[in-house]
Image (cartoon, rainbow, N blue to C red):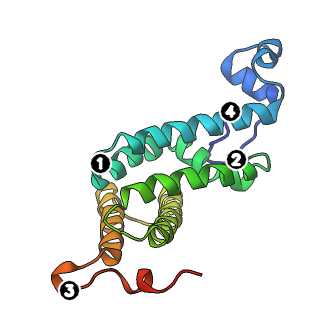
Amino acid sequence: MLGEEAGPALTVRAVCRQAALTERYFYESFSDRDHFVRAVYDDVCTRAMATLMSANTPRDAVERFVALMVDDPVRGRVLLLAPAVEPVLTRSGADWMPNFIDLLQRKLSQIADPVLQKLVATSLIGALTGLFTAYLNGQLGATRQQFIDYCVDLLLGTAAAYAPHRDRGEAEHPVAARQHD
């Protein structure tokens, strides 16, 4: 219900009706509607992180993430769209974002400078969030394979652009070489 295409029409009664539960049972597990919404969002974020952490390559990460978010578009909408329409998730979305950035930053080990790693990871997470949102909303017109290939190319190309090119005699990327304020 939270990730429905028409947007959330989420009430305790609607949740109970959908799950065939009594309101009493609902309140044994959740203090209120907001607690339930945060629990659903946290579950989707936890699954997304586990999916990404289990990947062995950038392509594997993108393919697994597409399977998780696109094959079940409700999950994708919960992760990417619900924080924009559910006031209770505004803070949750902001709390989870650094986890995704940190995960990607750890994968950017070919970029030696930690500040540059953080800049690249933050930029990529922002770009990928926009791409996945547009893909889920049917705004890109790309096939699944085109979408996956583009996301992989974006990850690899951006990381390569900021990695040292020792074959060209570069010790580090010019942005990393500048003094950090």
Q: Nearer the viewer, mark 3 or mark 4?
A: 3
| Residue occupied by mark 3 | 169
| Disc 3, SS | loop
* Residue drawn at (77%, 18%) of the image: 26
- Quadrant (top left, top right, bottom left, bottom right) of the C terminus: bottom right
Task: Please give the residue where the numbered disc 4 appears in the rendered image.
Answer: 39
In this picture, residue 37 sits left or right of residue 161: right
Considering depth in this image, is 2 or 29 the residue closer to the camera?
Answer: 29
| Front disc: 1 or 3 | 3
Looking at this view, is 163 or 150 the one in front? 163
Discs 3, 4 touching: Cβ within 8 Å = no
Question: Which residue does the image show at 36% across and 39% down from the upper left?
Answer: 54
Identify the residue under disc 2: 92
Mark 1 and mark 4: Cα distance apart in space: 27 Å
The percent coordinates of residue 112 (x first, y second) are 36, 69
The residue located at (54%, 37%) in the rendering is 46
- Three-letter residue code for mark 1: Asp
Secondary structure beneath label 1:
helix
Q: Residue at x 51, y 84 (%)?
A: 179
- The residue carrying pointer 1 sits among few (fewer than 14), some (14 to 19) or many (20 or more) residues within 10 Å by Cα, namely some
Instruction: Check disc 4 and report its element: helix, strand or loop.
Output: helix
Q: Are marks 1 and 3 in contact (CB under 8 Å)?
A: no
Residues at marks 1 and 3, CA–CA distance in whole angstroms: 32 Å
N-terminal of the two: label 2 or label 4?
4
Q: Amino acid at mark 2?
A: Ser
Answer with mark 3 or mark 2, whichever residue precedes in sequence: 2
